[in-house]
Amino acid sequence: MDKEELIAQYLTKKLSQEAQKEFDHLMVTDPQFKKEVTFQEDLRTVIQKEENEIIKSQLQDFETEEHSNFSFKNWFVAASVAILLGLSGAWYFNNSIDTEKLYTENFKPYRNIVQPIVRGETKTDLKTKAFTAYETKNYTKALKLFDQILKVNTDETIAFYKANVLLELDKTNDAISIFEKNLKTPDSLDDKNNWYLALAYLKLNNIKKTKAILGKLKTTSTYRNKNVKQLLKKLD
């Protein structure tokens, strides 16, 4: 994750556990990064104060004044507020969209279509164990078993399910790496990889990449077409 995105997520209190570790490390090892964080925090404080004090008072004035009496002073204040809002940067835009809520509303681990689990059966092969753990939401165990399978044989489908597990375990960047690697080799899961990749970037509060992937998915696939359109609309 780039530094600007880390700062944006920090300011909106949406850092994942792994992103928080990266942020804390940079705060200790990168003086320029720490300086930028401090600047953005100070700027946010100023803007919030201006919004609370100036906008509120001016709107009250505007409500009581006739349009024809709109003064130069009021115009100047309104312009100043607009400039302050423009200076707020990425964090202000992201703060207006609850990406965490949108992620929760849209994310659901992809269903098991590889190794159907039948009640009463006692198969003990590795793949059955892995998907049994997956279906019962024992994601830590599922991750270990998927890793064992992938050590023996590279399988993009198993990797796809592993990436779903990583999202559940809040290892979002690792999940992104898998989805992006899978997309370099076209297969029947491409639309699914793109959907979950978009959600992974949404979880990281990277709205720009999320919209780019969803836009591509909208024009190249009918997979979750309704969800894709709705999510794009909410991100605009």
Image: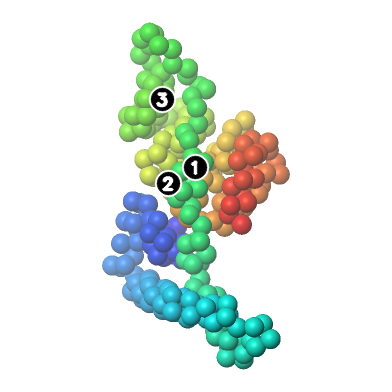
Mark 2 — residue? 172
Task: Residue 100 in the image: state x and y as whole percent.
Answer: 45, 50
Up/down of 115 relative to 42, above or below: above
Task: Residue 70 in the image: state x and y as whole percent.
Answer: 64, 86
Whether label 3 touches label 1, CB < 8 Å: no
- Residue depicted at x 57% and y 41%: 195
| Nearer-N-terminus badge (3/1) | 1
Identity, as a three-letter code, of the amino acid under mark 1: Glu
Mark 1 — residue? 105
Please state which of the two labelled residues, at mark 3 or mark 1, is closer to the viewer.
1
| Nearer-N-terminus badge (2/3) | 3
Pointer 1 local density, CA inside 10 Å: few below 14, some 14–19, many at least 20: few
Q: Quadrant of the C terminus?
A: bottom right
| Nearer-N-terminus badge (1/2) | 1
Inter-mark Cα distance, 1 to 2? 17 Å
Inter-mark Cα distance, 2 to 3? 20 Å
- Residue depicted at x 48% and y 76%: 56
Residue situated furthest left in the rendering: 28
- Residue depicted at x 56% and y 38%: 193
Pointer 2 local density, CA inside 10 Å: few below 14, some 14–19, many at least 20: many
Mark 3 — residue? 135
Whether label 1 touches label 2, CB < 8 Å: no
